[in-house]
Amino acid sequence: MANEQVITSIREHADAMLAEYPEYFVVDIRIKPTNNVKLFVDGDSGVPVEKLVSFNRNLYARLEAAALFPDNDFSLEVSSPGLDEPLKLHRQFVKNIGRKVAVTLLDGSEKEGTLLAATEGALTIEETIGKKKEKKTTDINLNEIKHTKVCIVF
């Protein structure tokens, strides 16, 4: 089975598993050549470790029953996307309103500021400019963005 078909099948199983938990959603699925499946799950208010463990056990059983891999030779990791993972879904942007983000544009330039708003088509950030720390509100179309990451602020 081609990798894309396997990912589609895994997504269907994961979505079915998460159907009773509307606050959680699949962010990404990756498969390494060694059949190591990585499922990234996020939640509107984060995901407790206990839930990730439960999701891992549930999805593992579903994938075994589906026999997607020869001889069921696969491993499964279910985790939340870490801070090093870019935001991908609208729900993630909404969840991070009020936090500092770094936006890399398709032209390679970067903008950094507080995420003020997120629509289906654009982000609004508040940048701090210059030594006088002037505030500037910037709207960025999602189709101009290469990736957006949450900044770690201490």
Image: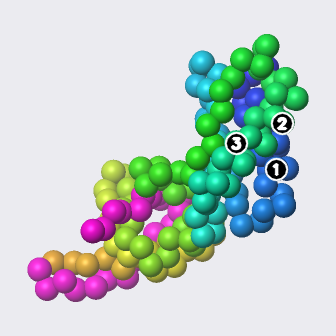
The amino acid beneath tag 1 is Met
Residue located 42% across and 73% down the image: 99
The amino acid beneath tag 2 is Arg
Residue located 53% across and 51% down the image: 81
Q: Give the CA distance from mark 2 to mark 3.
A: 10 Å
Which residue is the site of mark 3?
56
Q: Give the CA distance from mark 2 to mark 1.
A: 9 Å
Element marked by disc 1? helix
Which residue is the site of mark 1?
17
Which residue is the site of mark 2?
62
Q: Picture quarter containing residue 139?
A: bottom left
Residue located 51% across and 57% down the image: 87
Residue 95: percent from left, percent from top: 56, 71
Visible residue check, residue 8: no
Q: Earlier in the sequence, mark 1 or mark 3?
A: 1
Residue numbers of the magenta segment: 131-154
Dot 3 alpha-carbon crowd within 10 angstroms: few under 14, some 14 to 19, many 20 or more = some
